[in-house]
Image (cartoon, rainbow, N blue to C red):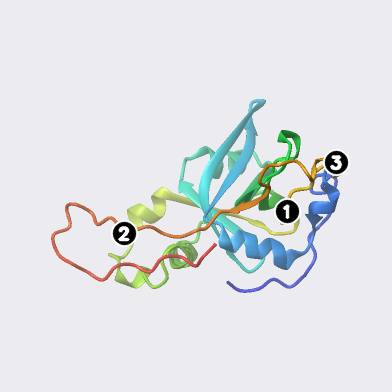
C-alpha cells in the first residue's frame, strides 16, 4: 500500500480515547498496519435516529480508507444521500488472556476507530482501479486471471472512501495483570495466542478442471 504524508492521527473530541488511555495510540503507521492486516471492518451510521452497524471488507490506498457494497446499500448510499460522519472500527483478536481470577481475564487485541464523512467515487476508471487494489489485497495476482468486470457490475457497485485522519488506535499486548495476593493461586495463567492460518482450499464442486490455486492474503 502507498504510504501517507503525516505520521500522527487527529486527536479530537470523538477520536480521543477516554477509558484505558494507556492502551491508546495516535501513531498513524500503527493504524495503517492494522487496517492493512485486517480483512473486515464494521461501519456504524444512523438513520432516522436508529443506529446501524454493517460488516464489510475494506482496503486502503495512501491516506484513504475504502469500502464497497451494492450501489444502493445503506452503508454506501446512506451517508451520501444525507451527508453524515460515520464511525468505522477494525479489530484483530491476538489472544486470550487467562488470569487467576475471573475479573482479570482479558484479551490481547489491536483496534483502530476512524471517523469521517464518506466521499462517493463515481469515475468508472477509478472504480475499476480500486477494485483491482481490493482484489490484490484479498488474493495477490488474481485480478489478471479473472473475467474482466463489465459496465453493469461497475454501475451496480457503490464505492466510497474516507480520509484516514480523525482516528485512534487501542491495543493490549501483555500477560495477565492479577491482584498481587493472587499470584500464588494454584491455576495456570498466561496468554493463549490466536494463530492465524488458512485451512485447505475447498474447490468449487462445479469446477471439473484443475487450475493453480490462488495466493492467500498476507498473514494478519
Residue holding disc 3? 181
The residues tagged by marks 2 and 3 sit, at their Cα atoms, a distance apart of: 49 Å
Residue at figure coordinates x 83%, y 42% from the top left:
19
Check whether the beta carbons of the residues at disc 1 and disc 2 lie within 8 A of each other: no
Horizontal side of 107 relative to 78 (left or right) equals right
Looking at the picture, how far across and down is residue 82, in whole percent?
63, 38
Q: Secondary structure at mark 1?
A: loop
Residue holding disc 1? 175
Q: Quadrant of residue 186?
A: top right
Residue at figure coordinates x 66%, y 52% from the top left:
109
Looking at the picture, how far across and down is residue 84, in whole percent?
68, 41
Q: Earlier in the sequence, mark 2 or mark 3?
A: 3
Using the image, tell me which numbered label, if any, was put on residue 201: 2
Looking at the picture, how far across and down is residue 136, in whole percent?
44, 68
Horizontal side of 188 relative to 124 (left or right) equals right
Q: Is residue 216 above or below residue 17?
A: below
Check whether the beta carbons of the residues at disc 3 and disc 1 lie within 8 A of each other: no
Nearest the viewer among 127 and 165 is 165
Q: Secondary structure at mark 3?
A: helix
**Direction top: furthest residue:** 49
Q: Secondary structure at mark 2?
A: loop
The residues tagged by marks 1 and 2 sit, at their Cα atoms, a distance apart of: 34 Å
Q: Earlier in the sequence, mark 1 or mark 2?
A: 1
Horizontal side of 114 relative to 36 (left or right) equals right
Q: Which quadrant is the N terminus positioned in?
A: bottom right
Nearest the viewer among 173 and 91 is 173
Amino acid at each position: 500500500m502507498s504510504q501517507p504524508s503525516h505520521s500522527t492521527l487527529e486527536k479530537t473530541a470523538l477520536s480521543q480515547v477516554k477509558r484505558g488511555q494507556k492502551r491508546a495510540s495516535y501513531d498513524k503507521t500503527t493504524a495503517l498496519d492494522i487496517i492493512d492486516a485486517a480483512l473486515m471492518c464494521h461501519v456504524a451510521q444512523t438513520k432516522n435516529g436508529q443506529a446501524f452497524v454493517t460488516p464489510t471488507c475494506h482496503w486502503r490506498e495512501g491516506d484513504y480508507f475504502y469500502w464497497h457494497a451494492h450501489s444502493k446499500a445503506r452503508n454506501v448510499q446512506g451517508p451520501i444521500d444525507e451527508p453524515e460522519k460515520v464511525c468505522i472500527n477494525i479489530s484483530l483478536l491476538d489472544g486470550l488472556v487467562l488470569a487467576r481470577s475471573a475479573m482479570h481475564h482479558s484479551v490481547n487485541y489491536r483496534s483502530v476507530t476512524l471517523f469521517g464523512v464518506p466521499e462517493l467515487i463515481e469515475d468508472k476508471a477509478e472504480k475499476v482501479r480500486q477494485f483491482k487494489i481490493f482484489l490484490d489485497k484479498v488474493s495477490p495476482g488474481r485480478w489478471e486471471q479473472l473475467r474482466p468486470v463489465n459496465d453493469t457490475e461497475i454501475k451496480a457497485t457503490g464505492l466510497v472512501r474516507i480520509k484516514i485522519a480523525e482516528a485512534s488506535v487501542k491495543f493490549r499486548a501483555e500477560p495477565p495483570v492479577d491482584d498481587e495476593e493472587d499470584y500464588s493461586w494454584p491455576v495456570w495463567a498466561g496468554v493463549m495466542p490466536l494463530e492465524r492460518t488458512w485451512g485447505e482450499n475447498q474447490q468449487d464442486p462445479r469446477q471439473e478442471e484443475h487450475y493453480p490455486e490462488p495466493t492467500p492474503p498476507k498473514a494478519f
